[in-house]
Structure formats: structure tokens, C-alpha cells
Image: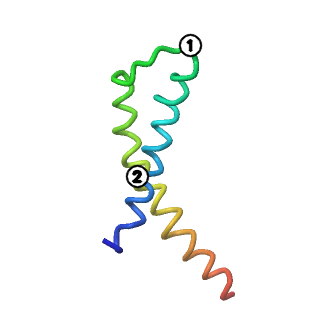
Amino acid sequence: MTKIHWALKGILFMVVIWLIVYVGIPYFDAEKPMEVENNLLNLLIALPAGVGYGYYRYKYLPARMKARKNR
């Protein structure tokens, strides 16, 4: 589990962003309809984007900062 925690954190982050954009904002805006079913394709796109974000944020950047600090 600890080997893939970065991927799970990234997926969770992108799902939260998806919820905010497609559920939260239309909930408070009367002009936009709340049709979450129409945006499920964007959720499928958010999952690999979350894995990419998690790799970049939790694996690549710390290694890069550590290498820069040791220079």
C-alpha cells in the first residue's frame, strides 16, 4: 500500500476537484443545471490525470528537490 500511496493521493485530489467543479459550483449557481451524469466522462479523464499528478507531486518533485539540495 505504501508503494502506491502517491497514486491514491493524486486520484483523491482529482476526484475532489471534479466534485467541486461539476457538483459544488452548479449547486450554488442557479443558472447552471446540475447534470452530473453528463460529466462522468470527465471523471474518467480525471483518474489518469490524478495518477500523473500524484507521481509528479509525491515522487518526482521530492526527488528533484533532494537532488538540488545535495548539489
Badge 2: residue crowd in 10 Å (few <14, some 14–19, many ≥20): many
Tell me the kind of residue under disc 2.
Ile
- Looking at the rendered structure, the secondary structure element under dot 2 is helix
- Looking at the rendered structure, the secondary structure element under dot 1 is loop
Q: Position of residue 31 (x, y in %)?
A: 56, 11
Residue 30: assigned label: 1
Direction bottom: furthest residue: 70
Residue at image point 40% right, 55% down: 51
Label tally: 2
* 59, 67: nearer the viewer: 59
What is the distance, in whole Å, between disc 1 and disc 2 at their CAs? 29 Å
Q: Is residue 10 above or below residue 32?
A: below
Q: Is residue 47 above or below residue 27?
A: below
Classify the position of the N terminus by image quarter: bottom left
**Residue holding disc 2:** 11
Badge 1: residue crowd in 10 Å (few <14, some 14–19, many ≥20): few
